[in-house]
Amino acid sequence: MIVIHKALRREFRLLPEIVAGVPAGDRSRARRVAAHAELQLRFLHTHHDSEDRLIWPNLARRTEVTTDIVDVMQRQHHTVDELVTEVRPLIQRWGGQADVPTRDRIVALLVALHPVLQEHLDLEEREVLPLIREHLTVDEWTAAVKDAEKHLPKNPRSGLLLAGAVLEDGTDAERRWFLHELPGPARLMWRLVGRSLYRSHLRTVRGPASHS
């Protein structure tokens, strides 16, 4: 979870500036940035959806101590979901129009989303992860992880881009763990084409100074 959170923090910190930097009428760049933003929003939604359905109910049933913090987690998810639900159709529309009013509304929503998400992730790591370790079984945790993976985009390019996002800020140990968890064919694909694809994607979305 901490490795996933690193990627989410970075992407939603950078997204407002990336979107704001797209010139009016530049539909080609707007399409690329919109596709990137949509992928990250889907990543966030999938991560939270699996928690809502498989983590929080199991945790809430274990002890009275966990009930309050689970309620907070669910309320924070609801706030995040409201912002995501509002911004996603705007991103899809802006990707084809590259108009300034829609771009600026997207930026405002993404700016509002980042601190809400940051607060949620910080609290989850500080207060909830110890409870998960104590009260959830390995099978219950694994089921939530597998469920999230099942609902991610199926096309290989999106999968490699999400892998790159997770690996980008990982420590050496976290990268080894993440790659070890990938199926063999996906791990091979990352080594053969994934790294170069992700570097190219970063240059396209963030600019030529970006690297992975």
Image (spheres, rainbow, N blue to C red):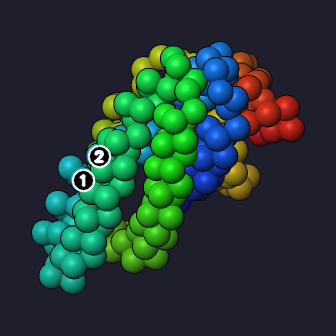
Please count the marks in the image.
Answer: 2
Label 1: few (<14), some (14–19) or many (≥20) C-alpha neighbours in 10 Å: some
Instruction: Name, please, the residue furthest toward the right.
Output: 209
In the image, what residue occupies the spot 61% across and 29% down? 33
In the image, what residue occupies the spot 70% across and 29% down? 23
67, 171: nearer the viewer: 67
Secondary structure category for the residue under label 1: helix
In the image, what residue occupies the spot 18% across and 76% down? 67
Asked if residue 33 is positioned above or below residue 52 in the image, the reply reads above
Rounded to the nearest whole Å, what is the CA distance between mark 1 and mark 2? 5 Å
Residue 19 is situated, as x and y percent measured from the top left of the image, at: 62, 38
In the picture provided, is 73 more to the left or to the right than 1?
Answer: left
Residue 122 is situated, as x and y percent measured from the top left of the image, at: 49, 70
In the image, what residue occupies the spot 39% across and 77% down? 127
Asked if residue 168 is positioned above or below residue 62 in the image, the reply reads above
Residue labelled with disc 2: 49
In the picture provided, is 64 more to the left or to the right than 69?
Answer: left
Q: Quadrant of residue 187?
A: top right
Residue 10 is situated, as x and y percent measured from the top left of the image, at: 62, 52
CB atoms at circles 1 and 2 under 8 Å apart?
yes
Secondary structure category for the residue under label 2: helix
Residue labelled with disc 1: 52
What amino acid is found at the position of numbered circle 1 in the picture?
Answer: Asp
139, 127: nearer the viewer: 127
Residue 115 is situated, as x and y percent measured from the top left of the image, at: 50, 64
Label 2: few (<14), some (14–19) or many (≥20) C-alpha neighbours in 10 Å: some
Asked if residue 30 is positioned above or below residue 132 in the image, the reply reads above
Q: Quadrant of residue 74?
A: bottom left
